[in-house]
Amino acid sequence: MKNGRKRIELGRYIVADPEICHGKPTFKGTRIMVWQVLDDVAEGRSWDFICNKRWGGRIPLAAVAEAVRLAREAWLERPHQPVRTGSELVVA
């Protein structure tokens, strides 16, 4: 336990452990950070490619689904404020 923080089970496949990757959410049993996989999804890579080619079978398809679901839930739960990025106004 680092700085009094404990490991948090975020789902069946995802954990936030202060001893692994500075507590960033990772897939259990790996140092693969959830944000890396979400970036792959956002870039349009297939889930099969992400799981089997990019990460060599270390994360199952169900883990990607869980990451997307948790990201969706986090998005729906937080208040959104308009933010200007360059010349566009987006909701963040």
Image (spheres, helix red, strand yellow):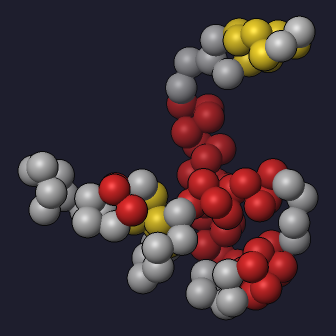
Residue 11 visible in the shown view: no
| Residue 79 in the image: above or below residue 41 | above
Location of residue 64 in the rendering, given as x and y in whole percent from the top left corner: 67, 68
Horizontal side of residue 20 vs 14, given as left or right? left
Instruction: Determine the residue positioned at 71% across, 12% down.
Output: 83
**Which image quarter holds the N terminus?**
bottom left
Q: Quadrant of residue 66?
A: bottom right
Give residue 50's position: percent from left, percent from top.
77, 75
The quadrant where residue 28 appears: bottom left
Q: Residue at x 12, y 49 (%)?
A: 3
Q: Nearer the viewer, residue 45 or 77?
A: 45
Work out whether residue 37 can be spotted. Answer: yes
Going 85% across and 55% down the picture, which residue do you hit?
43
16 horizontally vs 50: left or right: left
The mark tally for this picture is 0
The residue drawn where x is 54% and y is 71% is 32
Rendering coords of residue 34 (x, y %): 57, 60
Q: Is residue 58 left or right of residue 10?
A: right
Point out residue 53 in the picture as x, y percentages from the top left corner: 79, 85
Residue at the far front in the pictured view: 86
Dividing the image into 4 quarters, which one contains the C terminus?
A: top right
